[in-house]
Image (spheres, rainbow, N blue to C red):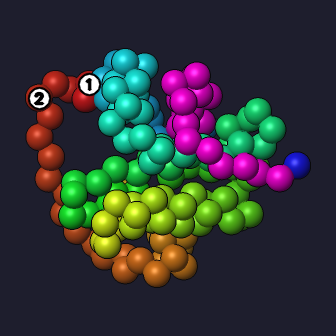
C-alpha cells in the first residue's frame, strides 16, 4: 500500500504518542505533549504537523514550527519497520515547501547526539550538521 501524508488531527493523538514512544522520543504527556497542548499546537500550526500513513496506521510524523525567520523541523519519527524508504525525507521536504510558502527561507532541526540516522537524513537533504551547545529554561519540569 502507498504511504500517504496528511496533516495530523487531534484524533491521531494516541497513535502519535505511541509512535513517539516506539521511536524513543519520550513524549511529555503531562506537559508539552499532553492532549490539551497538542490540540492548541494543531490550531496554531495549521497544516505543519504532518503524519505519514500506511492505510490507517500512523508510521511517521514531523512537527514543523517557525519563529517568523526560521522554520523548525521537530519530532521527525518513522516507525522502525518503515525506515529507509524515504518517508523521513518526504516529510521534511513537505514541511520545507509549506514553510517556504509562508516566506520562511531557513530551516533547522535539533538532533540528539549520537542519532546518526537523523544526521544522515538531514545531511542528505542538504542541511549542514554542526555541533552546538543547547541552553534551555523550563518554567515547569513537565514542559
Q: Is residue 89 magenta?
A: no
- Residue 15: x and y in percent read 62, 28
Q: Is residue 15 magenta?
A: yes
* Residue 29 badge: none
Residue 27 appears in view? yes
Relative to residue 31, is residue 50 depicted above or below? Answer: below
Question: Disc 2 marks which residue?
Answer: 139
Q: Quadrant of residue 72?
A: bottom left
54 vs 103, left or right, is right
Question: Disc 1 marks which residue?
Answer: 142
Structural crowding at the residue carrying mark 2, measured as other residues with C-alpha within 10 Å and reported as few (<14), some (14–19) or many (≥20) = few
- Residue 100: x and y in percent read 39, 67
Q: Please state, as top left, top right, bottom left or bottom right, where the C terminus lies in the image.
A: top left
Image point 55% across, 36% down: which residue?
8
- Judge by depth and name the residue closer to the eye, 77 or 112: 77
Report the magenta residues as a range: 2-21
- Judge by depth and name the residue closer to the eye, 35 or 112: 35
Give the main secondary structure, helix, strand or loop, of the magenta stretch.
Answer: helix
Q: Are marks 1 and 2 in contact (CB under 8 Å)?
A: no
Q: Quadrant of residue 73?
A: bottom left
Residue 115 appears in view? no
Amino acid at each position: 500500500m502507498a504511504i500517504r501524508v496528511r496533516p495530523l488531527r487531534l484524533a491521531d493523538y494516541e497513535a502519535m504518542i505511541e509512535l513517539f514512544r516506539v521511536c524513543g522520543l519520550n513524549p511529555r504527556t503531562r506537559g508539552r505533549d499532553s492532549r490539551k497542548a497538542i490540540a492548541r499546537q494543531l490550531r496554531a500550526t495549521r497544516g505543519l504537523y504532518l503524519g505519514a500513513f500506511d492505510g490507517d496506521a500512523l508510521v511517521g510524523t514531523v512537527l514543523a514550527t517557525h519563529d517568523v525567520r526560521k522554520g523548525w523541523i521537530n519530532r521527525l519519527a518513522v516507525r522502525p519497520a518503515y525506515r529507509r524508504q524515504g518517508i523521513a525525507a518526504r516529510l521534511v521536504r513537505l514541511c520545507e515547501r509549506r514553510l517556504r510558502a509562508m516566506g520562511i527561507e531557513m530551516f533547522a532541526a535539533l538532533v540528539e547526539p549520537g542519532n546518526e540516522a537523523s544526521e544522515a537524513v538531514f545531511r542528505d537533504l542538504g542541511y549542514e550538521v554542526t555541533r552546538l551547545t543547547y541552553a534551555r529554561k523550563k518554567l515547569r519540569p513537565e514542559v
